[in-house]
Each structure stands twice: as C-alpha cells, then as structure tokens.
Image (cartoon, rainbow, N blue to C red):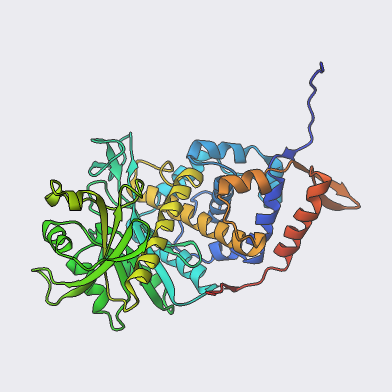
C-alpha cells in the first residue's frame, strides 16, 4: 500500500494511559504533599518552575521511560501529556539538573525523611520484613564520590556504592543512601539502619535479612541489643574458622534430592557468646546451578568438593528448614534493584555533584514507591509486572483532548476489547482511598 503523509496540529500523546496515574496522584494529594515540604529549593526568579511541577514532571518522565536527564525532553514536548497533569509548561533537562544541584547533605536528609515518612505513615502494615542490600553503579565521568572500589562488572572503573532497604511485604523502598565507590557494604550500616527505623517509626520490625556483606559482630550485636531485640537472618562469610566449623558437621538431614541441612552453635573468637548457625549443602551433581560456596580449605578432599555450602546466623527459634526458606525470600531485593536500574534510571540519573545525584535518586525511589501503590491498589494484580511491561500494557495508549459542550474529554485510541478493562482501572482510581491497607495474610 502506497500513501502520503500530512501533518496535524492536534495535540496527541502516546501516553494516554497515564491518566490513571494522574488520578492516583490527585487522590493522594501529591501536589499538596510536595508544597508542604518546606526544605525543597525554590526558584529565585518569578519565571522559574515551582518544586511541585519539577518533582511531579520528573516522576512522570521516569514512568514514561526516561532513565537519564536527556530523555526528559520527550515529556517536555508532549503538550497533551502536560494537559493531563495540569502543567502550563513542562521543565526540560537543564531545569532538573539545576534543581537537584541545589541540594546539600542536610537538605537531602530532611527531604528524604519527609517523603519516606509521609509514604509509610499512609501505608498501613506491621511486623514487616526488612531486606537491605548494596549495589555497584559504574561511573564514566568525573562525578563526586565516584571512586575505585569493588566493581565485579567493570574492574578498575570508578563507581558509586549505594545502600538500600526494602520492605519485602509491600515491595517498596524504605531508605536509600548514596555512597562513594570505595565504601564496603557494611560501612556505616548501623547508622543506616537507625535512619531506616526512624523513617518507619511506629511499625514493628518482624525480621531483618542481610547478605554476607553485612556479616559482622557490630551489626549482630546492634540487632540483639535494641530495646526490643530484632529477629535476623544473615548470610555468613566463609572465613577459615567458618569453613573448618562446617567441615566438622556430621549430622545432615536430607530435605530434598541433593539438598541437606544442619545447624550448630558457633562462637567466634571475637564474640562474647555462641550463636545459632544454620548450614545448607547442595550436591553439585544433582543441582549444578545451586548457589553457595565450596570449602576452599578442603578443595582436595572429594567429600567436600562435591557440595556447595551456604550458612546463616540467626536468633530465630524456628526449624532450620524454615530459617532457610525465609532467607531465600531475600532474593527479591535483588529483583527490586534490577528494576530500579532498568526502569527507573537508578544507575544513570547522575550529576557531577554528589548530593545532587543523591537527591535525584531519592525522587526516583519515590517514583518507585508510588508505582508500587499503583500496582497494588489500581491493577489489583497478583503478578508484579515491571514498569517496562506496564508501559506497553497500560500506559502506551494514544490519546488527545476534545472539547465537547464546554467540557474537555480525553479520547483514548483503545481497541473495543480492551475498553472494559481500562474502564475498570479508571473505576479503581476513582474509588481509591487513603490510607492504604496492606494485608500480611
């Protein structure tokens, strides 16, 4: 089929489905929430953009696929999308950069406290499971804090090494600190935990799960010596004494083909008392993809070489098999980090200024948490689709405004079979009420 092209002045957006998010933000009163945050930098000129428009449009840019500042120009030039969100004008990339560059460490702390506390004050759940993890973000420019450190993907490259906390039960980010690339996983972690618990005040910590990067006497004692001790499961680092201890275990319980479990009380030379260690070994022959480590000290002995081992220190009194099952749920934190990187620009929204980068990523975390609410309370889906999937399934709908009888109508280019589905989502947004109640069932 041959055809010509012509142009139209009609303002059409490819993101008509964003009207659902517009309703969500309106129902939770986001504009008022942002306006009430007195610590946000304000423009010096009367012609400058308000922090409310800057933050809201930055959130929408991320949801629309922007994962670096340059990509926000797509949102800027989408007049119909701006009309959906009631923006007279949409900021460009330089506006965002100037705005976040004004943030300092004290401002970041106060703004972060404000948004996380507001979020979790309005999300009703308790006895939560907290997963903490760190990740490496390779940098290629001259950004502050980008230093050489542990970087398994790009050895020798400068990086940042942020740390995050996730509430597993509601699949939301509870806290985030940006750190320089030469920082170890556990460095400053106790202070980070204190900050996280403050943001989640008035909620009960049911369990803390940590990988081996956080295996240390200081962290274990901190969790045990709280006014109300906190339950924990922490993966053990395979230091030589740990490997020798595991090699001495003889009472293994078979729980599945190629999987055996045991437990013991272990006291490090640095500890003041023994603690419970749950040990799992998986036979490589039956489970070639099994996670864990080999006992390198005994690599020449066949009885040890055929297994991969993992071990966990815990103060839980549950059966050892249940302790292992609970810890395996911590892997979801790694999925959250992957989605943050691929869909929310976590490793690509960066500025030369360290605290400017941290500020931009804090708002990216806020975008993630708001999307978690959308998935839970608007979509009501048991399947947790990633944002990139939601863009194609829900948000990428051609639309334009038309004025009928002095009222603006958003017309969506949606196939007949999908209209009932979208009408149901629209109904969910209109019936949305705060606070949000999550069930622990």
Whether residue 137 is situated above or below residue 2 in the rendered picture: below
Residue 44 at x, y = what percent?
48, 51
In this view, 329 is above or below 318: above
Quadrant where the C terminus sits is: bottom right
Query: Residue 142: x and y, percent?
Result: 30, 36
Residue 378, picture quadrant: bottom right
Image coords of residue 28 (percent x, y): 62, 66
Tell which of 331 and 321 is nearer to you.
Answer: 321
Single out the residue that lies furthest toward the bottom. 227
Nearest to the observer: residue 376 or residue 190: 376
Q: Between residues 397 and 42, which one lies in front from this camera angle? A: 397
- Residue sitting at x 70%, y 40%: 14
Q: Residue at x 35, y 61 (%)?
A: 132
* Rendered-image quadrant of the N terminus: top right
74 versus 106 height, above or below? above
Q: Residue furthest right?
A: 405
Indicate left or right for 157 with 99 as reference. left
Front residue of 98/135: it is 135
The answer to whether residue 88 shows anywhere in this view is no
């Amino acid at each position: 089929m041959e055809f010509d092209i012509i142009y139209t002045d009609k303002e059409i957006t490819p993101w008509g489905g964003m009207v659902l998010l517009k309703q969500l933000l309106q129902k939770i009163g986001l504009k008022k929430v942002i306006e009430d945050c007195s610590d946000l930098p304000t423009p010096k000129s009367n012609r400058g953009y308000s922090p409310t428009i800057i933050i809201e449009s930055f959130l929408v840019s991320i949801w629309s696929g922007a994962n670096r500042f340059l990509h926000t120009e797509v949102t800027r030039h989408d007049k119909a999308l701006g009309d959906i969100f009631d923006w007279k004008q949409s900021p460009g990339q330089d506006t965002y950069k100037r705005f976040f560059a004004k943030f300092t460490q004290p401002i970041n702390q106060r703004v972060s406290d404000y948004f996380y506390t507001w979020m979790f004050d309005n999300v009703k759940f308790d006895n939560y499971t907290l997963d903490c993890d760190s990740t490496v973000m390779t940098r290629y420019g001259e950004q502050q804090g980008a230093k050489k450190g542990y970087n398994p993907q790009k050895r020798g490259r400068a990086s940042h090494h942020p740390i995050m906390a996730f509430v597993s039960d509601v699949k939301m980010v509870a806290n985030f600190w940006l750190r320089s690339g030469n920082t170890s996983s556990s460095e400053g972690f106790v202070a980070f935990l204190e900050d996280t618990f403050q943001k989640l005040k008035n909620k009960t910590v049911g369990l803390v799960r940590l990988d081996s990067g956080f295996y240390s006497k200081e962290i274990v004692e901190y969790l045990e010596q709280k006014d109300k001790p906190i339950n924990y499961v922490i993966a053990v680092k395979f230091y030589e004494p740990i490997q020798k201890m595991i090699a001495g275990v003889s009472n293994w319980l078979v729980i599945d083909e190629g999987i055996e479990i045991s437990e013991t009380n272990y006291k490090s030379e640095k500890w003041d008392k023994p603690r419970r260690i749950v040990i799992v070994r998986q036979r490589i022959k039956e489970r070639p993809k099994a996670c864990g480590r080999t006992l390198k000290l005994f690599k020449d002995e066949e009885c040890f070489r055929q297994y991969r081992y993992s071990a966990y220190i815990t103060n839980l009194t549950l059966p050892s098999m249940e302790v292992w099952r609970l810890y395996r749920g911590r892997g979801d934190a790694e999925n959250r980090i992957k989605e943050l990187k691929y869909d929310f620009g976590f490793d690509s929204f960066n500025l030369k200024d360290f605290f400017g980068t941290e500020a931009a990523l804090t708002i990216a975390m806020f975008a993630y948490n708001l999307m978690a609410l959308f998935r839970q309370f608007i979509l009501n889906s048991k399947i947790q689709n990633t944002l990139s999937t939601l863009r194609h399934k829900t948000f990428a709908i051609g639309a334009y405004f038309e004025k009928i009888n002095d009222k603006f109508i958003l017309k969506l280019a949606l196939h007949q079979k999908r209209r009932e589905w979208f009408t149901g989502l629209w109904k969910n947004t209109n019936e949305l009420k705060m606070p949000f109640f999550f069930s622990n069932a």
